[in-house]
Amino acid sequence: MMDGVSGIGDEVCPVCKLDTYMNPSMRFLINTECYHKMCESCADRIYSQGPAPCPYPNCGKTLRKNRFKRQLFSDVAVEREVDVRKRVAKVFNRRREEFASLNDYNDYLEEVETAIFNLVNKVDVEATEARLEAYEAANRQAIAANASIQTREAENAELMLNLEAERRRQQRAEALEESMAEQELKREVERKVIKELANAREGEAEDAVRKAVAAAQKTVQLKKSSARRSARDTPSVSFEAAALSMINTKLATPDARDELPYDTLEEEEYVNDLYTVGEHYYDPFLDNIERSQQAKAAGFGVRNVYEQLLFEAFMGLGCFIENEKARHKGAVTT
């Protein structure tokens, strides 16, 4: 028996009694007049010729096919409340800046919520509907103006989302291009080093490697300078137009700092003032490696080993264990 919305199974059409087990492609529709559910086939069969009464007993509503829609929420009460809120919001669409004080704006919002409550819970429906119609008739121009502002704000918000997505896509493309350029430069350095080592005489391998690395670094700097000039000379018209549109609609513009590259050290460089690396240290193991032709061909430099060992030896200076323990203990106890 069709006794209303709550007593009907979710998978069975209350009109034709078919279910989704026999027809997996079945779609259920509801009508905003009474929110009674039926399958799409029944809605087409009953209302294709024009308006007809609702097939639910004791309903008495006349339904039209163009008022049927898909049910978005499993709870029909939630579906009905959402529709009521959308309908009331199209009429009561005044903005905060239209009120002289916050109390006046809060009173207005309370009036709106009262109208929604009455319509959702069917309390003084006729009086509430009359109040909505009277308000809409008296404020038709203001309602249209605010609706136009809301439309522009929604369009600008969508525009900024699209621009942000495009900006991120460009950043990913630039990062990929930069990564590929760095890999190509590394391969170029390797080629130049191999070429210099192949042409170097005995005992000149280290100088040849330095010369090749210096030439490759110069090439890198030239390419980076050219890329910066190209980026600086390229105008970003689309983003400027979007920012102007956001200002005109009183929306916040994106923070300019977001466009800056992220620097973990914030341009701070390590300065060594603890020790000085000497030209040579007594170490038979390293001396044997330095004299090896294979090590020279591979670009091995013993000075790099000296620098690494001294850095690791001196990196603990200035750190007092007892003070660190006391500070950690105080942080834990507090």
Image: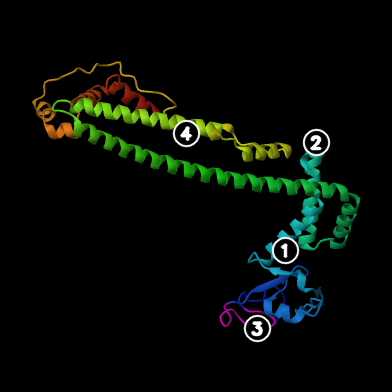
Image position of 70 (left or right of 117): left
| Few, some or many residues within 10 Å of mark 4 (<14, 14–19, 20+) | few
Q: Are marks 4 and 2 in contact (CB under 8 Å)?
A: no
**Disc 1 residue type?**
Arg
Quadrant location of the C terminus in the rendered image? top left
Q: Residue at x 24, y 35 (%)?
A: 195
- For label 1, the residue is 80
Where in the figure is residue 314, as x and y percent of width and height? Answer: 25, 21
Tell which circle, 1 or 2, labels the residue nearer the N-terminal end. Answer: 1
Label annotation for residue 17:
3
| Few, some or many residues within 10 Å of mark 1 (<14, 14–19, 20+) | some
Which residue ends up furthest to the front in the rendered image?
Answer: 199
Q: Are marks 3 and 2 in contact (CB under 8 Å)?
A: no
As measured in the structure, the alpha-carbon distance from the residue carrying label 3 to the one carrying label 2 is 57 Å
Q: Are marks 1 and 4 in contact (CB under 8 Å)?
A: no
What's drawn in magenta, residue-wise? 12-24
**Disc 4 residue type?**
Ala
